[in-house]
Amino acid sequence: MSVKVEVIEGGVPHNKIMIAGFIGTIVCLYLTYLNVLTNTGLFAFFGGLAAVFALIWGSHTIKVLCSYGIGTGVPSAGMIAFGSGTIAMLFATKFGVYAPIVAFVLAAIIGFILGYVSNNILNMRIPAMVQALTEMAVVGALTLMGFAALISGGFSFAGLTTGTITTLGMALSTHQISFLGGCLIAVAFLLGAIAIQHPFNACLGPGWKQDRMLMLTAECGFLSMIVAAIMSYALIDHISATISLIVALIGWIYTYKQYLVLSKRDAAAWLDSKPIPDVEGH
Amino acid sequence: MSAVAAKPQAGGAMNPGAMAVGIILLIIMLGICYMVSPGIGLVALIGVIIGGVLIGFGVHFVPVGGAPAAMGQAPGIATGVAMLAAGAGLAGLFGGAWAAEQGFVIAIVTGAVGGGMMMAITCMMVNFVYVFGMGIPAASGKVAKDPITGDTQAEYKSQGTEGHGLPFVSFVGGVIGGILGGAGGTLIYLELLDLYKATLPGIMSVTAAQVMPIAVSVAGIFAVALFLVNAVLTAYNITGTIEGPHDPKFKRWPRAIVASAVASALCGLVAVLIVAF
């Protein structure tokens, strides 16, 4: 198989991925709202799917930005995405059912100003900078909101700050056992930040293929979702948490297998070397 | 122009127009904060801005080597700004947060010492690995003599490299950067913690003791987020690598001060608005 350099330009256009990622994320986030309408926690797993959609979009944005060789390493892009996204996401949770929309708008404003700051004040002069930082702040905010919905069952400020603890058969309201009070948001922050920056960091180079990188992103997203689903046992009922965990496991196993297939496809030569045989007589 | 061919045009030049826009943005954000929360909110926002500027300025001192340093072809610590600043700053932030009960000054000093210690240990172990593991001496490529010790550098520098290892001035720069970053991160945390401790009980109609975990957690995650935003913006300013305070890139710090102030004011304003609405 010959390696073509122009393959970097190929694949699905970025705008298509952006629109699909945005719609998928918002729809999945609102599907978690069924929890509130039906008064259960069964739909929490949609939060994890929203995070995976947002991460796929975000990793392709990082590819667009980091193709310019910004000189700071790919992980820094993931860090600024979640740094600016956290702030927008926490503020948006105050708006109840409108939280995902507010998070989107506010994160876009924060990202736009940060993009202007880096492009003009810091003189980066990268054409894709403003749009990429805007998108990345949105992705950071929506991913965190997805993890919040997955772990705590909802995305309202009250839901994220209040939990219940059962002592001697009595259910008491507490603020310590909650997404914010227990600072689970810090774990969600890094689960997302690592999942968003790793795929392009791992796949970049002349052999970059879009589908392979996006499959790796989905794999990283589901891997983060597994951890988040395990953490959700602390905050939502066990049946809902188990559903989230099963969905995450199925998604991870499927995407991991697909990623292996794509990696073997793109490898120059792949040899299934068997374990070293025991040679007798030595 | 393909995406691969285009390289960043970032140089040392200042952009006075954009800087003016940045300062106007800063004043607008302070104005908005004064409108919605003139007392405690404005104080917190000013603290956050000072903390953000300290972080942005401090990162310039840290010897960031990146991938070339890992191969012994450039001086500095062999990782990116985001990782290094996060390591040093968060170490300081955690130290300062732990001492938050002891009072404002002690907490800030603890944060600064924590960040400085983290960087001192990192720089020391990095030089151990460079000297005893990779077998390379410390030599700067940017200056002929170490500004502090006066040692000449050229004899120790290998041909074809920009220097290698961690010269003494870079070590000192790293510690100063850690001190500034740790103090800045702690200052952001303390200001936001005071704000949330004072306002959240009224908003959530609970007692002050019940609100503590949420105040600590939200202030902490905001401090981390602001730290990373400021660190990455500074990384953009120095386009990845810097040797320390003697590096010519260090002269770009005024841009980072404005950028950090605008970014911190923006993020800090949102952090204040959470409890102002």
Image (tube, coloured by chain):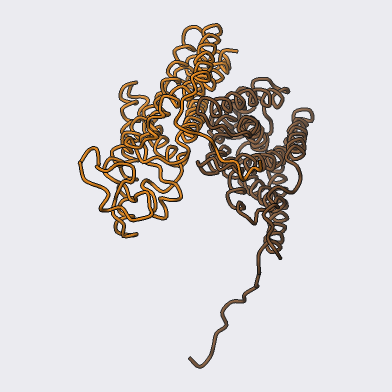
Q: Is residue A69 above or below residue A103?
A: below
Instruction: Name the spot of residue B11 as percent of width and height, x first.
Output: 47, 33
> Which residue shows up at 58% across the image and 23% down it?
A113
Q: Between residues B272 and B165, which one lies in front from this camera angle?
A: B165
Q: Image quadrant for the C terminus of chain B?
A: top right
Q: Where residue B219 sits: x, y (%)? A: 49, 25
Residue A12 visible to the viewer: yes
Q: Nearer the viewer, residue A260 or B212?
A: A260
Camera-side residue: B274 or A171? B274
Task: Give x and y (percent) for residue B139.
Answer: 29, 49
State the image quarter where residue B85 is shown: top left
Q: Residue at x 65, y 72 (%)?
A: A271
Residue found at the very far front of the displayed protein: B1
Residue A170 appears in the rendering: no
Q: Quadrant of the N terminus of chain B?
A: top right
Query: Where residue A36 sits: x, y (%)?
Result: 75, 28
Q: Which tint was used for chain A?
A: brown
Would you say A33 lies left or right of B118 here? right
The answer to whether residue A107 is left or right of residue B128 is: right
Q: Is residue A164 above or below residue B121?
A: above
Q: How many marks?
A: 0
Q: Residue at x 34, y 40 (%)?
A: B119
Q: Nearer the viewer, residue B114 or B17?
A: B17
Colour of chain B as rendered: orange
Which of the 4 image quadrants contains residue B57?
top left
Left or right of residue A179, residue B136 in this image: left
Q: Residue furthest left?
A: B150
Seen at 20% across and 41% down, the residue is B149
Q: Residue A94 occupies which quadrant of the picture?
A: top right
A245 sits to left or right of B57: right
